[in-house]
Image (cartoon, rainbow, N blue to C red):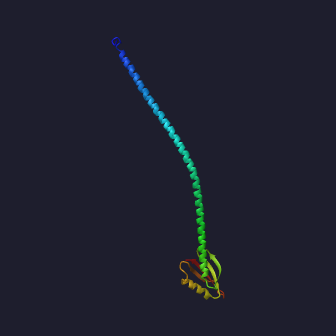
Amino acid sequence: MAEALKPGIGERIDSVLSQVATSRRVRGGAVLVVGLLLWTTVSRYRHVNQLKAELAENQNMLRRLSAIVAQVEELERAAYMSRAYMSVTQDLLQQRRFLTRLLESMPAGLEVSRFEGSLGGRLSLTVFAQTEAEISGWLSSQSAGVKDAREGFVIVSTSSASSGPPAAVQVTVRPK
């Protein structure tokens, strides 16, 4: 029977069979490509959704942290103000100690009538006494370093303020 078939028919059958096999391979490859594309699309979609969820979570965390940062900034401002207040208070206490030491160093009979300047820097004052010897005795005792060097004051200059019976001397001092 194979002889009965025409000579080109076997070749045609082989050709058709190879085309069918090729088309099956092509279809199998196409199905594989479509499957890969579908899998890639689904995984990308899932990844995008995960990133969106992560973004929402990060934005919530950012809102919470922004509130904390605002509180920290407010605390830093309050701390700065407290430090500034404490610095002013300490300066006032030092100035008070300086003035107290200055006045305590004066013997009875000396009177201070006028203060000029700042307590942190130089301070000019006019000192009155019955005699100039009382004032010069106080000035010499201070120049000799009777007081503790860390807590005393330095006499910068002196000048006679009057020549009358109540002696007056202009004294400029500064803290040590």
Q: Position of residue 150 (x, y in %)?
A: 54, 78
Relative to 13, say whether 89 is above or below: below
In the rendered image, the quadrant that contains the C terminus is bottom right
Quadrant location of residue 70? bottom right
**17 with respect to 94 (left or right):** left
Question: In this view of the protein, which residue sits in the foreground, 75 or 141?
Answer: 75
- Residue 88: tell me if it is visible: yes
Relative to 162, say whether 72 is above or below: above
Q: In the rendered picture of this protein, how many numbered marks are placed on residues?
A: 0
Query: Residue sitting at 54 percent across and 43 percent down?
Result: 53
Looking at this rendering, what residue extends furthest in the front direction? 1
Q: Position of residue 29 (x, y in %)?
A: 42, 29
Query: Residue sitting at 60 percent across and 65 percent down?
Result: 82
Relative to 83, say whether 144 is above or below: below
In the rendered image, the quadrant that contains the N terminus is top left
Question: In this view of the protein, which residue sits in the foreground, 85 or 173?
Answer: 85
Q: Position of residue 124 (x, y in %)?
A: 61, 78
Q: Position of residue 3 (x, y in %)?
A: 33, 12
Looking at this rendering, what residue extends furthest in the left direction? 3
Relative to 54, say whether 109 is above or below: below
Query: Residue sitting at 40 percent across and 23 percent down?
Result: 21
Query: Residue sitting at 56 percent across and 85 percent down?
Result: 141
Quadrant location of residue 153? bottom right
Question: In this view of the protein, which residue sits in the foreground, 63 or 172?
Answer: 63
- Residue 119: tell me if it is visible: no
